[in-house]
Image (cartoon, helix red, strand yellow):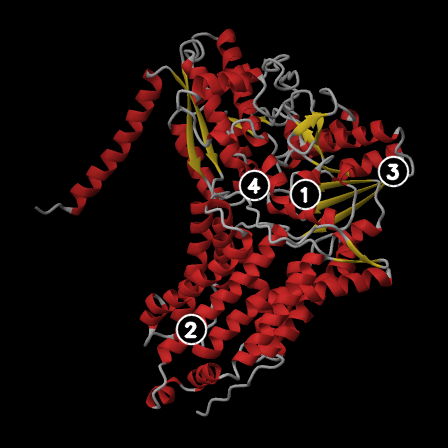
């Protein structure tokens, strides 16, 4: 049998259009709320994505097992963008045609690339622990939601904890060892502004990505005689930083990190050697919180979990649960406001900006998101590694938000003027 | 600038350089035998480290058994690469063989984290992390031991090229057709070179893995190794040792002197500048043989 070129092209075109129509009809007919989760499973964010995404899927399964929200099932479309912007944009465009009302790429460069598109298309972009810190300003970024303390807030929280420990930071020295990327440099303005305000001196030490050799950095840190050290990186950069801190005899109980530190990092460096290490904790870790227990009972025990059982309750797994809980709370709020939909990005946006004092039964700090504040209040707690787990040493709190919001406003105003 | 800091950076930099030179020695070994620059050397270091990790963490072997087992396995991998990939390229332009090694690098960099998982893995070879101070100077135990092991292995490679098998390899390198004509088994010599090169890469991968953990980023050792091989001369094993120390020193001192001035990480830039400068000023490197073709 032979097929004419024209027949083939016409058939292929019809099939392509038909497949899109089918999906659109399906989305309209099924009672589903569709979230797109193109994330980086193969390149840069691999250290966190698997566990983060597993937590998200398990929480969605828990909600769906209980009947969903208002009779609607939560559908998570998971794919791999490999931290590659063209692939991520393609995934976003596909998700949009399939009716997705939210996208969570868990990647700073991808999130930055998507901002103009989601703003124009009115699709909600989640940038938890990634993306632009100034997206906390909902007036400048109406469709971008960090929904978690941004890097400026995390820096502010650490400095306040140091102040709580030492009483006064006047004359003290804080050193930041950071990966030499925009992410690594991001907290510097807040450390500098707080230094001017609180009287401590600040010194930054950049290292070349990915940070697998920092042997020439840490002797300089040691000789700077810091009172506190903050290290700011991801993946192998974190474990190498910790190893070098140990080798340079820097007291581990004066060493601290942003949220990007997990139990698996402790395994690499040695659980016992890391006792006293400090990190910013956006939600509880471990399996004891009620929300994790519910997941274990309803999803994991019947064998419906999305991944390795051993990862349930790790820091990054719980970050995923936290974010999924906030997204789905947004869906709940959206149904309260408009029970009959239609299920659109605008509809969900109204729900997300109505989240009020949501803490998932104490699993996370009470979070309130408004059309102005997309960060959610900027609360976290400080945890120390006790040799086995990250144990909280403070209650949920926020600090230095005046300095943080000055940075947010400065940067957001620049974005409003230049769209960059 | 604090002189003690400079001294400390220089000592640690020299040892780091010696660890790099182990990867570079593998590149030189293959180049000396077959005239091909192996761009998969970083990926072989990563693969060897993954094998050692798998032998300890998945199979449950102690490090003293897992390491030799990985070395043997990687020797076989190197020889098999030559047998089933490189030998197919006989008769093809040399650039195609080099591109093949580049393809292997890309495939292995994606494949191994896919098989073993993307999280950083731990290899414990028993070197303590506790600080070692000599006066005001801190010496990094892992770098000291790693550098010493690398130094010994590169020295062994120098002696190897004066052994009977080494002389055979040099003959193959000089003229494959002439070697064939006098009964040298050229393919066998090249396969052994690939096997030994993989063993060197594995040793480097394990030493670096013990320092930083095992993940895809071990394959980035290729850039440093290339800088060293080019600076030292692609056909000079002693050159590798000296160039390794030079690259390690330059990187370490650049981090200590230039980074604070410009507020950025220049460590990797140093290696790239060394590659460029060498190719422009002395293309055959410090100790490489200058090839003159009569036309």
Q: Which residue is mark 2?
A: B192
- Return the residue at label 4: A109
Q: How many neighbours does mark 4 have within 10 angstroms: few (below 14), some (14-19), or many (20 or more)? A: some
Q: CA distance from mark 2 to mark 1?
A: 45 Å
Numbered circle sitting on residue A363: none
Tag 3 subunit: A
Q: Residue at x 47, y 43 (%)?
A: B117
- From the viewer's perspective, is the residue at label 1 or at label 4 nearer? 1
Look at the picture and state if A238 lies above or below A131.
below
Q: Please name the residue that numbered disc 1 is placed on.
A: A184
In the rendered image, residue B132, in percent from the top left (x then y), is placed at 77, 55
Residue A144, image quadrant: top right
Work out whether B197 lies above or below A157. below
The residue tagged with tag 2: helix, strand or loop? helix
Q: Residue at x 35, y 81 (%)?
A: B185
Co-location on one chain, circles 2 and 3: no
**In the image, are marks 1 and 4 on the same chain?**
yes
Mark 1 element type: helix
Q: Nearer the viewer, mark 4 or mark 2?
A: 2
Mark 3: few/some/many CA within 10 Å (<14, 14-19, 20+): some
Of residues A265 and A221, which is closer to you in this image? A265
Task: Tell me the tag on residue A200.
Answer: 3
Dot 2: within a 10 Å radius of its alpha carbon, few (fewer than 14), some, or many (20 or more) residues? Answer: many
Q: CA distance from mark 3 to mark 4?
A: 32 Å
């Amino acid at each position: 049998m032979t097929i004419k070129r024209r027949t083939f092209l016409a058939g292929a075109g019809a099939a392509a259009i038909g497949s899109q129509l089918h999906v659109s009809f399906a989305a309209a007919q099924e009672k589903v709320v569709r979230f797109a989760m193109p994330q980086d499973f193969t390149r840069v964010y691999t250290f966190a994505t698997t566990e983060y995404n597993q937590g998200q899927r398990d929480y969605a399964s828990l909600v769906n097992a209980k009947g969903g929200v208002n009779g609607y099932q939560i559908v998570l479309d998971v794919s791999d963008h490999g931290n590659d912007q063209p692939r991520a944009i393609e995934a976003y465009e596909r998700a949009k045609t399939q009716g997705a009302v939210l996208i969570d790429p868990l990647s700073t460069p991808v999130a930055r690339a998507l901002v103009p598109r989601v703003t124009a298309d009115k699709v909600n972009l989640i940038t938890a622990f990634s993306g632009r810190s100034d997206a906390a300003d909902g007036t400048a970024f109406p469709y971008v939601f960090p929904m978690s303390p941004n890097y400026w807030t995390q820096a502010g929280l650490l400095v306040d904890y140091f102040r709580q420990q030492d009483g006064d930071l006047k004359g003290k020295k804080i050193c930041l060892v950071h990966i030499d990327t925009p992410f690594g440099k991001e907290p510097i303005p807040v450390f500098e502004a707080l230094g001017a305000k609180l009287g401590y001196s600040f010194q930054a030490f950049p290292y070349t990505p990915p940070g697998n050799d920092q042997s020439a950095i840490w002797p300089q840190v040691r000789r700077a005689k810091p009172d506190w050290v903050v290290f700011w990186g991801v993946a192998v950069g974190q474990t190498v930083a910790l190893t070098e801190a140990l080798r340079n005899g820097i007291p581990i109980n004066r060493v601290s990190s942003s949220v990007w530190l997990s139990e698996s990092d402790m395994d690499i460096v040695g659980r016992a050697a890391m006792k006293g290490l400090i990190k910013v904790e956006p939600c509880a870790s471990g399996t004891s919180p009620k929300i994790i227990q519910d997941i274990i009972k309803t999803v994991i025990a019947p064998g419906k979990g999305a991944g390795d059982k051993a990862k349930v309750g790790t820091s990054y797994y719980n970050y995923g649960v936290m974010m999924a809980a906030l997204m789905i709370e947004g869906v709940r709020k959206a149904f309260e406001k408009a029970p009959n939909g239609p299920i659109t990005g605008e509809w969900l946006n109204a729900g997300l900006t109505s989240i009020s004092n949501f803490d998932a039964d104490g699993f996370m700090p009470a979070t309130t998101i408004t059309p102005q504040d997309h960060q959610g209040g900027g609360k976290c707690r400080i945890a120390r590694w006790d040799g086995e787990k990250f144990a909280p040493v403070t209650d949920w709190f926020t600090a230095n938000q005046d300095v943080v919001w000055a940075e947010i406003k400065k940067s957001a105003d620049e974005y409003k003027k230049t769209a960059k | 600038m604090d002189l003690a800091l400079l001294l400390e950076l220089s000592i640690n930099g020299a040892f780091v350089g010696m660890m790099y030179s182990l990867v570079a020695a593998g590149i030189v070994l293959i180049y000396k035998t077959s005239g091909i620059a192996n761009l998969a050397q970083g990926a072989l270091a990563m693969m060897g480290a993954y094998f050692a990790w798998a032998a300890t963490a998945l199979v449950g072997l102690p490090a003293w058994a897992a390491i030799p087992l990985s070395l043997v396995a990687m020797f076989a991998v190197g020889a098999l690469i030559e047998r089933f990939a490189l030998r197919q390229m006989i008769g093809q332009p040399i650039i195609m063989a080099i591109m093949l090694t580049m393809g292997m690098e890309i495939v292995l960099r994606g494949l191994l984290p896919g098989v073993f998982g993307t999280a950083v893995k731990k290899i414990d070879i028993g070197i303590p992390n506790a600080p070692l101070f000599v006066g005001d100077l801190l010496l990094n135990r892992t770098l000291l031991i790693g550098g010493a092991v690398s130094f010994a292995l590169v020295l062994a490679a120098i002696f190897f090229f004066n052994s009977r098998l080494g002389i055979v390899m040099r003959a193959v390198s000089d003229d494959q057709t002439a070697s064939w004509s006098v009964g040298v088994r050229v393919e066998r010599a090249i396969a052994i070179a690939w096997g030994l090169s993989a063993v060197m890469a594995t040793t480097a991968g394990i030493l670096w893995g013990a320092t930083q953990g095992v993940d895809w980023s071990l394959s980035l050792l290729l850039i440093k190794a290339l800088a060293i091989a080019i600076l030292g001369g692609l056909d000079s094993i002693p050159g590798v040792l000296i160039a390794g120390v030079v690259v390690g020193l330059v990187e370490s001192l650049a981090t200590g002197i230039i980074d604070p001035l410009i507020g950025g990480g220049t460590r990797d830039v140093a290696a790239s500048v060394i590659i460029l400068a060498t190719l422009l000023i002395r293309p055959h490197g410090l100790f490489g043989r200058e090839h003159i073709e009569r036309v």
